[in-house]
Image: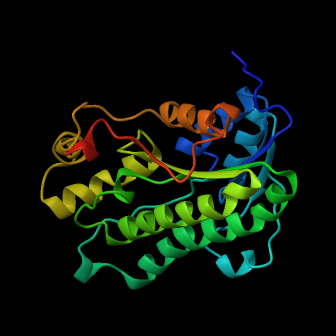
């Protein structure tokens, strides 16, 4: 059912061709927004854009130097694109660490920097950063991911403080493990570093800290993103919204 409370708004979703990003694209389109699906995968971006009646932006967000002079015309920016690498620190590939910092921390900064001037001109904007329970807690073997998400939390709060006087809010969503390709791809790595069979990873690693023992669905995260973009959330800024089944309650 369409709500139409975002009619006339332009939403940009990074990593928008799959997982949480795709669910967000559908949520914003359902609410009436025109959605720009930003993704590295050209075919998937085109397919997703067609599904939501939006447009595709094929972009490598890890090439941060190319984003230095970028300008963006959007009312809603969702920083969602990310990857995962699971490895002990002594074995962690330095290039992989740098890649994750560029993709998951530098590019959100550059996209926010590119989007704020137009948001300020309009006196309205929403920055929604898809963080993680790992933006609030740490897990072994995820040094790059945890570092990037902790940095994103700080960036989001600074954006909230600077954007507030201009009608721009900035918040993080902090899910635990979501049923996405990113999570599915790390099962083998988790099994390797923890020394357990792959079929035990979800129960023994991914759900061990949560009170509710299931994976989160992408649409659940998107529902919260849709609310954060709405007028009803106009006084919500600088916050980190956990959707983690009780993980961070410990």
Instruction: Tell me, yes or no, if residue 77 can be seen here.
Output: no
Q: Residue furthest top?
A: 1
Q: Which quarter of the figure is the N terminus placed in?
A: top right
Please name the residue shown 29% across and 58% down the image. 137
152 sits to left or right of 37: left
Looking at the picture, how far across and down is residue 196, in whole percent? 13, 53
Please name the residue shown 39% across and 65% down the image. 145
Looking at the image, is 22 positioned above or below residue 108?
Answer: above
Looking at the image, is 172 positioned above or below residue 116?
Answer: above
Instruction: Tell me, yes or no, if residue 209 can be seen here.
Output: yes
Observer-nearest residue: 26 or 9?
9
Looking at the picture, how far across and down is residue 223, in whole percent? 56, 31
Please name the residue shown 62% across and 36% down the image. 233
224 sits to left or right of 112: left
Please name the residue shown 54% across and 35% down the image. 224
Observer-nearest residue: 227 or 188?
227
Number of numbered callouts drawn: 0
Observer-nearest residue: 125 or 84?
125
Q: Quadrant of residue 14?
A: bottom right
Q: Residue furthest front?
A: 165
Looking at the picture, how far across and down is residue 76, in whole percent? 72, 48
């Amino acid at each position: 059912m369409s709500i139409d409370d975002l009619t006339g708004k332009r939403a940009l979703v990074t990593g928008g061709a799959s997982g949480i990003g795709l669910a967000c694209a559908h949520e914003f389109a359902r609410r009436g927004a025109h959605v720009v699906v930003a993704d590295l995968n050209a075919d998937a971006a085109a397919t997703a854009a067609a599904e939501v009646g939006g447009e595709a932006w094929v972009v490598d967000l890890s090439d941060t130097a190319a984003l230095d002079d970028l300008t963006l015309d959007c009312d809603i920016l969702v920083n969602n694109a990310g990857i995962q690498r699971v490895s002990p620190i002594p074995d962690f590939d330095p290039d992989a660490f740098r890649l994750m910092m560029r993709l998951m921390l530098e590019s959100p900064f550059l996209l926010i920097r590119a989007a704020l001037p137009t948001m300020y001109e309009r006196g309205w904007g929403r920055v929604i950063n898809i963080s993680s329970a790992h933006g609030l807690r740490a897990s072994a073997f995820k040094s790059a991911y945890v570092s990037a998400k902790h940095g994103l939390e700080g960036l989001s709060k600074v954006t909230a403080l600077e954007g507030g006087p201009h009608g721009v809010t900035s918040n993080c969503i902090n899910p635990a493990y979501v049923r996405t390709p990113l999570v599915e791809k790390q099962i083998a790595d988790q099994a390797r570093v923890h020394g357990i069979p792959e079929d035990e990873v979800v129960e023994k690693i991914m759900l061990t800290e949560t009170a509710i023992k299931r994976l989160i669905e992408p649409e659940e995260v998107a529902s919260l993103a849709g609310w954060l973009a709405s007028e009803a959330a106009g006084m919500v800024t600088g916050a980190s919204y956990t959707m983690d089944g009780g993980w961070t309650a410990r």
